[in-house]
Image (cartoon, grey):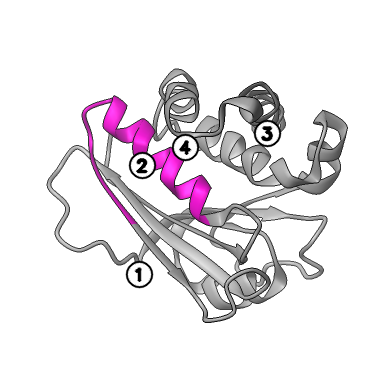
Amino acid sequence: MPHQEIIFAGFGGQGILSMGKFLAHAGLEENLNVSWFPSYGPEMRGGTSNCSVIVSDEPIGAPLVTDATAVVVMNRPSLDKFERYVVKGGLLIIDSDLVNREPERTDIEVIKIPAQRIAEEVGSKKIANMVLLGALVEKTKIVSMESLLKALKEHGKEQFYELNKKALERGAEFAK
């Protein structure tokens, strides 16, 4: 598996840091080198939040991502800020229910997912982040879905496991 650098971004309270955490734990499950670097404004819930995750079979020098192989955004300010971080040929995943503009870049792959609507169909808008994470894992093959589910089971809240699993699967289906 090659070196991949991911940025997850949105508002505080959307599960941005959780997406990164579960991905990092899944990388550890596969004996890969990982870094998880959270960042959020002083407002926390409702303020902007992002995290950088690096998953690699090589040692990781610094945890900060400036050349992202993929960016996942859950709001317009995050698209405005991080679209330029995606490397040429990289992947941009957008929650199309919350982002009201088209990406400007034409040299990257863009997947627009109505994550809020899909999450609501599964059972709760709160799991829209898991829909997006499922799509990312399916599209990039950064880790296996099995490793991601194991990370979710071990590091997530048990009462939300089945709901989160369904959301991940729906996101993966959407990305196929």
Pointer 4: residues within 10 angstroms few (<14), some, or many (20+)?
some
State which tag comes first along the sequence, 3 or 1: 1
Q: Quadrant of the N terminus?
A: top left
Hey, what amino acid is under mark 1? Answer: Thr
Q: Which mark is residue 140?
A: 4
Q: Which mark is residue 109?
A: none
CA–CA distance between discs 1 and 2?
18 Å
Q: Quadrant of the C terminus?
A: top right
Residue placed under numbered mark 2 in the picture: 24
Label 2–label 3 contact, CB within 8 A: no
Numbered range of the magenta stretch: 17-36
Q: Position of residue 159 (x, y in %)?
A: 64, 26
The main secondary structure of the magenta stretch is: helix
Q: Which mark is residue 66?
A: 1
Which one is in front, 60 or 37?
37
Residue placed under numbered mark 3 in the picture: 171
State which tag comes first along the sequence, 1 or 2: 2
Pointer 2: residues within 10 angstroms few (<14), some, or many (20+)?
many
CA–CA distance between discs 3 and 1?
26 Å
Q: Which element is circle 1 on? A: loop
Label 3–label 1 contact, CB within 8 A: no
